[in-house]
Each structure stands twice: as structure tokens, then as C-alpha cells.
Image (cartoon, grey):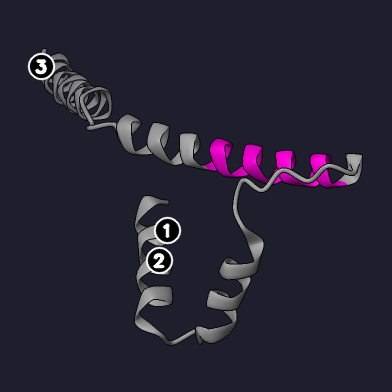
Amino acid sequence: MGETLVEDLIEEAHAREQARRTALAEFRPRRTALLAGTGLLLVLAGGCVALQVLSAMAGTPVRVVPEGPVADALRRLAWHDRPVVAVAAGAAVAG
């Protein structure tokens, strides 16, 4: 009879621990807004690149982003400049 009581206590403790782990996993905060925003930015950037490439291949380039000023600005920046580090940090935080 004593063994049954100890086994019951062990099973109850195991069940409580399992319930606690399940509850923690279920109610863990999700980062859906951040993930949706990051995904939307990636889709928009990819769409702009695809539009520019396809229109240039067709012979009538659409200038969604003027590449001249952007290329000049990027050539002047070094990897250790503050704007470059800030964008890299933002991308790392966004995941």
C-alpha cells in the first residue's frame, strides 16, 4: 500500500510538471507582428527588384529606385560607418 501511494505521488508530480511545460509553451509570446512586417518588407523589396530587372530586360526600364544616386551613396559608405552599422543592427534585431 505504501508503494502505491509513492507511485501516485510521483505520477501526480510528473503530470503537474508536464501541464506546466505545456502551458508555458502554449502561452509563450509570439512575434507575429514583427515577422509579418519583416516578411512584407522582403516581399516589397523583392518585387521592386524583379520589376526593375524584368523591365530592363524588356527594353523599357522602370526606375522604381534610381540606381545612380543610390549606387553613389553606397560607394561613399564604409562597413564601419554608423548608418551601415545601424541598418545591420536593425536587420539582426528583426531576425
| Mark with earlier residue (3, 2) | 3
Question: Which mark is drawn over residue 87?
Answer: 2
| Distance in Å between CA atoms under marks 3 and 2 | 61 Å
Query: In terms of image quadrants, where is residue 62?
Result: top right
| Distance in Å between CA atoms under marks 3 and 1 | 56 Å
The secondary element bearing badge 3 is classed as helix
Bounds of the magenta segment: 42-56
> Residue at horizontal 47%, vertical 34%?
40
Residue kind at label 1, given as amino acid type: Ala
> Residue at horizontal 43%, vertical 75%?
84
> Residue at horizontal 50%, vertical 83%?
77
Instruction: Characterize the magenta stretch by its predominant secondary structure.
Output: helix
The secondary element bearing badge 1 is classed as helix
Q: Position of residue 43 (x, y in %)?
A: 57, 36
The answer to the question of whether label 1 and label 2 lie on touching residues, with beta carbons closer than 8 A, is yes
Q: Nearer the viewer, residue 59 or 78?
A: 59
* Camera-nearest label, 3 or 1: 1
Question: Which mark is drawn over residue 91?
Answer: 1
Q: Which residue is mark 3?
A: 5
Residue kind at label 2, given as amino acid type: Val
Q: Residues within 10 Å of mark 1 (few under 14, many from 20)?
A: few
